C-alpha cells in the first residue's frame, strides 16, 4: 500500500487467488489521520465497561448470616475484644469495601467514538494491515474454502483477522463460511468499532464494506449506530441491576 499527502492507495486482491486485480483509494479522513492514542484508550475502556453486567455483590458484616451473640465476654479472658464473629477479620465474616452492584457505563461523545475508530483504522493502514478484496462470493457455505482463501491472501502469518462484511442475504454464504474459523472475527460494516480493529492483526474489507466509498460512505453514521447500540444495551443492564436492588431492598424491609 502506498500513501501520499493527497490520497492513500490500497491494492484490491482477488479473493480466490490473492492476486492483485486493481487499486482503490482510501478516504484520507478515515484512514490517513494521526492516531489519537488517548481518545482510543478512553473509548475502548468505555466499550469494555459497557459489556460488564455489574451484578457482583459481596456481603458486609450486617448481611452475613449469624454473629448476633458476643463470642466471649469483654474482659478477663486475655483475648482480644470482639463483639461479633461476622466482622471482616473473622473467617466466615463479612467483606469490607467489597464490590457492590453498579454500572460501568461511560457516556462517550459520538465525535470521540468516531475519532477513535478513524485513529484505529489509520494506524492499521499506516502499518499496511488493511486489505481489500473484490468480493468473497461463495456459492455455498464452505469453511474449508474460506480457510484456503485466507491462506491465498497470506493469512498464514496472521494471528487474528477481522473480516468486515456487508449485510444482506447475498452475503449469507460468506458469513457462514468464515464463522467457524477460530482466528477470524466477523463484523458487519455498520458495527465497525475501535476495539475490534485494535485487537486483530489484519482488517480485511470488501469493496462493498470499505468505509468512505460511494457504496459504503456511512462510516460516520455507522459509528453513531454502534454508540446507540452500546448505550441501549448498557441502559438495559443498568435497569436490570436497579430492579434487582429494589427487590432485595423490599425483601430486607419485609423481613
Image (tube, rainbow, N blue to C red):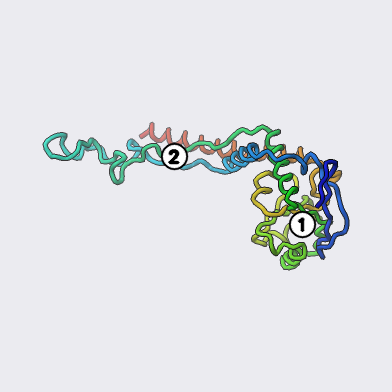
Number of residues whose C-alpha sits closer than 10 Å to that of mark 1, classed few (under 14), some (14–19) or many (20 or more): some
In this rendering, is residue 121 above or below 17?
above
Q: Nearer the viewer, residue 214 or 243?
A: 214
The location of residue 207, given as percent across then percent down, is 83, 51
Residues 147 and 7: in front is 7
Other-residue count near label 2 (Cα within 10 Å), few / some / many at <14 / 14–19 / ≥20: few
Q: Residue furthest front?
A: 4
Query: Which residue in the structure is indicated by mark 1?
Result: 172
> What kind of element bears circle 1?
helix
Point 65% across, 59% down: residue = 159
The residue that appears at 69% across and 56% down in the rendered structure is 161
Q: Earlier in the sequence, mark 2 or mark 1?
A: 2
Of all residues, the one furthest to the right in this rendering is 22
Quarter-wise, where is residue 84 in the image? top left
Residue 139 x/y as whole percent: 81, 64
> Could you tell me which quadrant the C terminus lies in?
top left
Side (left or right) of 92 relative to 198: left
Query: Camera-side residue: 12 or 16?
Result: 12
> Which numbered circle lies on residue 109?
none
Mark 2 vs mark 1: in front: 2
Q: Is residue 153 above or below residue 255?
A: below
Q: Position of residue 201 (x, y in %)?
A: 68, 54
Examine the rendering and report whether any part of residue 228 can be seen: no
Q: Residue furthest left?
A: 76
The location of residue 59, given as percent across then percent down, is 38, 40
Decide: marks 2, 1 in contact (CB < 8 A)?
A: no
The residue labelled by disc 2 is 99
Above or below 219: residue 174: below
**Between marks 2 and 1, how big is the CA–CA gap?**
43 Å
SS at mark 2?
loop
Amino acid at each position: 500500500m502506498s500513501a501520499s499527502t493527497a490520497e492513500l492507495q490500497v491494492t484490491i486482491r482477488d479473493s480466490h487467488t490473492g492476486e492483485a486485480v486493481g487499486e482503490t483509494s482510501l478516504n484520507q479522513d478515515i484512514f490517513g489521520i494521526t492516531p489519537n492514542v488517548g481518545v482510543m484508550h478512553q473509548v475502548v475502556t468505555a466499550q469494555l465497561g459497557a459489556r460488564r453486567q455489574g451484578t457482583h455483590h459481596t456481603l458486609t458484616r450486617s448481611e452475613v448470616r449469624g454473629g448476633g451473640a458476643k463470642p466471649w465476654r469483654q474482659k478477663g479472658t486475655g483475648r482480644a475484644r470482639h463483639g461479633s464473629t461476622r466482622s471482616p477479620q473473622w473467617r466466615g465474616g463479612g467483606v469490607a469495601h467489597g464490590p457492590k452492584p453498579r454500572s460501568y457505563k461511560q457516556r462517550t461523545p459520538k465525535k470521540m467514538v468516531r475519532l477513535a475508530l478513524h485513529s484505529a483504522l489509520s494506524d492499521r493502514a499506516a502499518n499496511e494491515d488493511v486489505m481489500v478484496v473484490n468480493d468473497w462470493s461463495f456459492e455455498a457455505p464452505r469453511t474449508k474454502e474460506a480457510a484456503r482463501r485466507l491462506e491465498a491472501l497470506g493469512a498464514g502469518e496472521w494471528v487474528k483477522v477481522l473480516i468486515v462484511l456487508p449485510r444482506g442475504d447475498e452475503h449469507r454464504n460468506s458469513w457462514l463460511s468464515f464463522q467457524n474459523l477460530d482466528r477470524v472475527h466477523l463484523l458487519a460494516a455498520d458495527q465497525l468499532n475501535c476495539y475490534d480493529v485494535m485487537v486483530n492483526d489484519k482488517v480485511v474489507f470488501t469493496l462493498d464494506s470499505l468505509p468512505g466509498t460511494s457504496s459504503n460512505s456511512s462510516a460516520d453514521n455507522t459509528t453513531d449506530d454502534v454508540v446507540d447500540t452500546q448505550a441501549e444495551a448498557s441502559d438495559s443492564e443498568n435497569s436490570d441491576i436497579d430492579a434487582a436492588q429494589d427487590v432485595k431492598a423490599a425483601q430486607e424491609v419485609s423481613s
